[in-house]
Amino acid sequence: MAESSSNGSGAGNGDKLKSAAKTVVPMVASAAAFTGGALLKQKLMPKRRKVLGMSMPAKPKVGAKPMGKQLSKAGRQAATVGQRLGRLSGDVERAGRTAQRVGDSMS
């Protein structure tokens, strides 16, 4: 029979520690790597800004020149819409006068 000391440290305990270390060390290393990767991603990725609940881009992707072109195009579209609304109101006014004349001639 194998003899062991009274404090419980025998030849078998050293093997158990080595076995546990072989299992625990890779687990701790992978957990540390995962945590480090998550922290690094959080620091490097720009925070998404929200305005009225909508995500906004982190930084504008257009310069001043394309922005000016877009403003110019929007101005032209607004002018076109204004002209169309003017024509529409004129047409509505003419239709009202015609309806009034038809109503007057019937009475």
Image: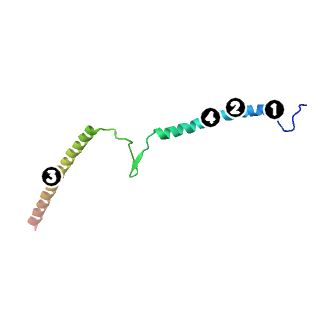
Dot 1 falls on a residue whose secondary structure is helix
Which disc, if any, is residue 87?
3
Dot 3 falls on a residue whose secondary structure is helix
Q: Quadrant of the C terminus?
A: bottom left
- Residue 75 lies left or right of residue 107; in this view the side is right
Name which residue lies at 51% across and 38% down.
40
Q: Position of residue 32 (x, y in %)?
A: 59, 37
Depth check, front residue: 104 or 97? 97
Identified by mark 3, the residue type is: Arg
The colour style of the image is rainbow
40 up-or-down from 95: above or below: above
Name which residue lies at 34% across and 38% down.
61
Q: CA distance from mark 4 to mark 3?
A: 74 Å
| Residue that label 1 marks | 12
Identified by mark 1, the residue type is: Gly
Dot 2, how many residues are within 10 Å of its Cα: few (below 14), some (14-19), or many (20+)?
Answer: few
Q: CA distance from mark 2 to mark 3?
A: 84 Å
Which disc, if any, is residue 22?
2
**Of pointers 2 and 1, the one earlier in the residue sequence:** 1
